[in-house]
Image (cartoon, helix red, strand yellow):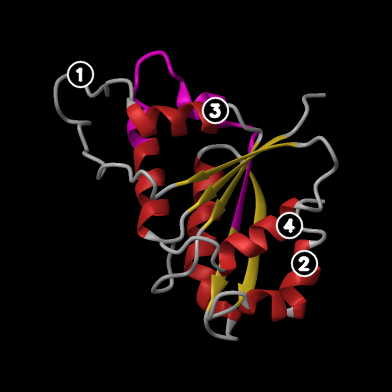
Amino acid sequence: MTARSFLFLLGSSRPDGNTEELARLAAEQLPTGTAQRWLNLSRPALPDFEDLRHEGDGSYPAPTGHAATLLEATLGATDLVLASPLYWYAMSTSTKRYLDHWSGWMRVPGVDFRERMAGRTLWGVTSLATADRSVAEPATGTLRTIASYMRMEWGGMLLGIGNRPGDVLNDPAATAHAKHFFG
């Protein structure tokens, strides 16, 4: 059995925000020795995704810079955790931009991105500023559908209520769920 390796991708525009705090609480519950890597999706920011599918042979060049780091880290993980606050009922811009780059990575010759992602697990962590957890359904549905398309396992979405920094730790349902989320 392959040892699990978690990649936490932080998509907040605020460092140490509620979503990151909730993700870190959940990560603390992983078995000792479980590999974890934490990367910020907005520092440095990825460039906007450019759709090149209909140019030339439809292939994409190998990514460089931060995009290459993200591709390598993504392929090196068994579990991907997208930690993005809920902004206007969806994931943050940096999180969506990262996922947009998957379209290009699927077309980089020799990477076999979609094939290599199959069987990994995709997780989501988000914080929202309202007690109505149903407003996170669009973001949850997006991630679940991406997992299905990529033939990945869908691990689930950890939701926390928190507006001001630190508020999410006062959400008893979120903190209780975090303690068993990756179990």
Q: Hey, what amino acid is under mark 4?
A: Ala
Q: Amino acid at mark 3?
A: Leu
Answer whether labels 2 and 4 touch (C-beta < 8 Å): no
Q: Secondary structure at mark 2?
A: helix
Gap between marks 3 and 2 measured at Cα: 27 Å
Magenta segment boundaries in residue numbering = 103-124
Q: Pointer 4: what residue?
A: 26
Instruction: Compare marks 2 and 1 and give the one earlier in the sequence.
Output: 1
Q: Which mark is residue 177?
A: 2
Is residue 34 found left or right of 39 in the rendered image?
Answer: right
User: Which badge, 2 or 4, comes first in the chain's sequence?
Assistant: 4
Q: Secondary structure at mark 1?
A: loop
Task: State the residue lying farthest toward the right.
Answer: 32
Point out the image quarter for the N terminus. top right
**Towards the viewer: 69 or 154:** 69
Q: Residue at x 78, y 36 (%)?
A: 34
* Res 179 seen here: yes
Q: Residue at label 1? A: 57
